[in-house]
Amino acid sequence: MCPWEPKLSAYWDGELPPDEQGQLKAHLQTCTDCQATLAAWQRLRQRFQQDSMPTGRVAIATTLERLRRDGAIRPPLFVGWLERLDAWFARPTVSFGAAMTVALALALLLANAPNLPATVAKQVKERAQQAMKQWTPLPFLRGRD
């Protein structure tokens, strides 16, 4: 192992002091191991620049599809189902029908909402009256009101 190898990363990032930077630059003229290491880092940087992260919806989908095809990732079982569901809801007739169904259900719920508290209050009152009819006071409380 070359004694300059631990300083290659700092050199690569431009963090070496100027005097050491000059010495390492002179060392790189003769050391093939350090040259190979820096060349590998350069190739890695170029690869990252070429394979930059996708930003558009289509680019993300194609990248994920490529990773699945290559076996790099395994999506959970429900992902395929969600993708099919997403494609199904993308159809105009289906999305319109789903929206109308939700709107109708909300309209029915809201139409019955004003009567709901009165209905619940009436049921609570009836159950309380039934409970009072069935209730018998404890023997030591009889005769007291």
Image (cartoon, rainbow, N blue to C red):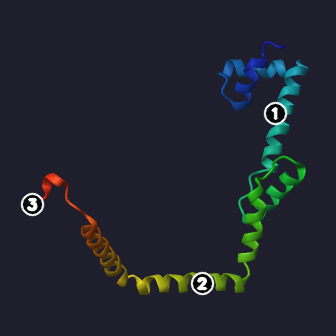
Pick out the residue farthest to the front. 139
Q: Earlier in the sequence, mark 1 or mark 3?
A: 1
Pick out the residue farthest to the left. 144
The label nearer to you, 2 versus 3, is 3
Disc 1 secondary structure class: helix
Eyeballing the image, is 86 above or below 45?
A: below
Q: Is residue 12 left or right of residue 127?
A: right
Between 87 and 112, the one lying in front of the other is 112
Q: Position of residue 123 (x, y in %)?
A: 34, 76
The residue positioned 71% from the left and 86% from the top of the image is 93
Q: Position of residue 113 (x, y in %)?
A: 39, 82
Please report contact status of discs 2 and 3: CB closer than 8 Å, yes or no. Answer: no
Q: Which residue is mark 1?
A: 41
Disc 3 secondary structure class: loop
Q: Which mark is residue 101?
A: 2
Amino acid residing under circle 3: Gly
Disc 2 secondary structure class: helix
Amino acid residing under circle 1: Trp
Q: Residues within 10 Å of mark 1 (few under 14, many from 20)?
A: some
Q: Earlier in the sequence, mark 2 or mark 1?
A: 1
Please report contact status of discs 2 and 1: CB closer than 8 Å, yes or no. Answer: no
Amino acid residing under circle 2: Thr
